[in-house]
Amino acid sequence: MFSSAQVVLVASVFLSLASVLAAHPRRAYGRHALNAYVVDWDVDASKVPYTSVDHIIYAFGIPDAHGNIGQFSGSTLSSVVNGAHKHNVGVSLAIGGWSGSIYFSNLVKSAGSRATFVKNLVNLVKHYDLNGLNIDWEYPASQNGVACNTKSADDTAHLLTFLQELRSALDQTFRKQHVILTAATSLDPFNDRTWNPSTQLPGFNNVLDQVYIMAYDINGNWNSITGPAAPLYEPGHGLPGSGASAVAAWHKAGIPLNKIVLGVPFYGWTTKTSHNGLYGSFSKTQIPGDQYDTKSRDCGAKVATYSGEFQWRSLAAQGVDQSRNGWQAHYDTKTQTAWAYNTHKQQLVTYDDARTCEAKAKYAKQHGLGGVLIWSLEMDDSHHTLLTSLQLVR
């Protein structure tokens, strides 16, 4: 039998323990200021600069019509997770992507399909010892994704319900760690039932740890004139959209600044034009970018085309940023982006260089954002020039 004094002592110990646990809820793994995508088709786990990033997002797990997630190398993902954890860096798996969002609308539409999808995602987190999930639906209630995407005016409402159910399942399953839940988004907040950007997104702040704004591919061959691919500030000339305007829109819709993460591309876009400068006409026949740019065809497209993507590692190797090999490099202080022109080739390329990356890191820091996001790590040069320029955000 315990004495009354012993009972009081034991009770006080339990109360103290409970108060400690209440004061220190489950925490997310690692830090999340400098986040970087790695891609399944071009990553060597032994060469990832783990000490220079806070969190890694592995792209992509592709959901099929039944909510099964596949089309990635499990062994490569495991190698990245193991390497990251040795350096106290967390890993999320990105779900979807540009060509992997075909079935999202149907998967989140009904309670039954959501339950299956959620169960499969939770099992992935368990199996690969993941620290987060990144939902990359491009895009809810929108005509701007690939032609084959299923879509509904109620996509955003269904997405919120799905995220709430996924958040609940993660919390119930992982008691010792907070598994982070993030969303990769366009410049505009998710569309409402009118297929236009929402002005308010109640509920999303409660389920998302961070919103990754993909502030790139803002201008390209779909425009009538050339423009900076990823401007930090709006360029004018009838070209709306920028990283800063996207941050303002998402914040106005209800996402706190400290949950907003600004996307930074480690690549640019090229086009053929006789105009030596930005904001001129150009050929609508897309020329190839660098050696990594091969013809491809989106689901529903009639012909395969080049994208025009020009990765930083190629820009640096060809001396584009150093005005070598026929290129003349310039910097646009209004948008904080770089561009270069080759008169002989009649070729323009717009891109983010080290100066651009530093400007975006400073912007994120000065405005109290959650951090920055890189797409994608393998596109940097061997000296990690762009990654180094982003370190001040940490």
Image (tube, rainbow, N blue to C red):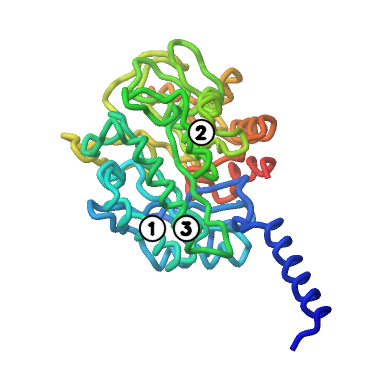
Q: Quadrant of the C terminus?
A: top right
- Residue at x-position 46% and y-position 35%: 214
Amino acid at dot 3: Leu
Amino acid at dot 1: Leu
* Residue 318 in sight: no
Indicate the secondary structure of the residue bearing disc 1. helix
Q: Number of callouts in the render? A: 3
Indicate the secondary structure of the residue bearing disc 3. helix
Residue 202 lies, with reference to residue 136, above or below; the image says: above
Residue 170's mark?
3
Question: Which of marks 1 and 2 precedes in the sequence?
Answer: 1
Amino acid at dot 2: Val
- Residue 115 found in image quarter: bottom left
Indicate the secondary structure of the residue bearing disc 2. helix
- Dot 2 crowding, Cα within 10 Å, few <14, some 14–19, many 20+: many
Residue 121's mark?
1
Closer to the camera, 321 or 91?
Answer: 91
- Residue at x-position 39% and y-position 36%: 309
Distance from the alpha carbon under mark 1 to that under mark 3: 9 Å
- Residue at x-position 62% and y-position 45%: 33
Quick check: marks 2 and 1 in contact, CB under 8 Å? Answer: no
Closer to the camera, 12 or 218?
Answer: 12
Distance from the alpha carbon under mark 2 to that under mark 1: 42 Å
Question: Which of marks 3 and 1 precedes in the sequence?
Answer: 1
Tell me if 139 is positioned left or right of 89 in this view.
left
Residue 320's mark?
2
